[in-house]
Image (cartoon, helix red, strand yellow):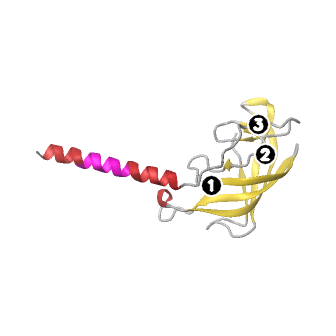
Amino acid sequence: MARPAVYTAITLGAGTLLTAAMTTVSATPALSAQAPPTVTAKGDPVLVTCAFKPTAHPKDFIVACGDGNSRLVEMRWSTWGPKSATAIGVNVVNDCKPYCAAGTFRGYPVVVRVDRPETWKKDPKLQQFTRMTMTYTDGRPSGYNRVMTIPLWE
């Protein structure tokens, strides 16, 4: 008789974990519907998404590909050229309190600049921006500097 109780406990536990995981995912702010990635007509550099797709002028961009805990949304590009591109938008960051799966996503206005174009290894005909600088204009996530510069992946 002990065996069915163990199976019931395992099944209930798995169901609880699945429910918690789905609740966490559904609590994450959705990225707005985005047109398929496009490449600039002029041959200017692109941003490479987490799915390794070249894109130009994205409205949304995941910064933390591993866990999605940092993303840019509502981006409006004022410049996009051969050396750099600049936008304003919102950096949505998970505060990970008490831990990331139960954390709260909070938005912080930013000015974004991407630069340092280099040849994209996946498609040598394209240049990709390899560095991003985010300047927080009204508050910032705990532990972040007002200006954060990060390398972008290849």
Q: Nearer the viewer, mark 1 or mark 2?
A: 2
The structure residue drawn at horizontal position 48% and vertical position 56%, both measured from the top left corner, is 101
Q: Which mark is residue 38?
A: 3
Q: Nearer the viewer, residue 43 or 152?
A: 43
Q: Which residue is mark 2?
A: 57
In the visual, does 39 lie left or right of 107? right
Report the amino acid beneath label 1: Ser
Tell me if residue 80 is in the magenta stretch: no
**Residue 61: image location, x then y, percent:** 69, 48
Decide: few, some or many residues near mark 3? Use Cα within 10 Å; few <14, some 14-19, many ≥20.
some
Q: Which residue is mark 1?
A: 70
- Sequence-first disc among 1 and 3: 3
Q: Which mark is residue 12?
A: none
The structure residue drawn at horizontal position 75% and vertical position 53%, both measured from the top left corner, is 75
Marks 3/2: CA distance? 8 Å
Report the amino acid beneath label 2: His
**Residue 80: image location, x then y, percent:** 85, 47
Q: Nearer the viewer, mark 1 or mark 3?
A: 3
Q: How many marks?
A: 3
In the visual, does 120 lie left or right of 70? right
The structure residue drawn at horizontal position 85% and vertical position 39%, both measured from the top left corner, is 44
- Sequence-first disc among 1 and 2: 2
Q: Main secondary structure of the magenta part?
A: helix
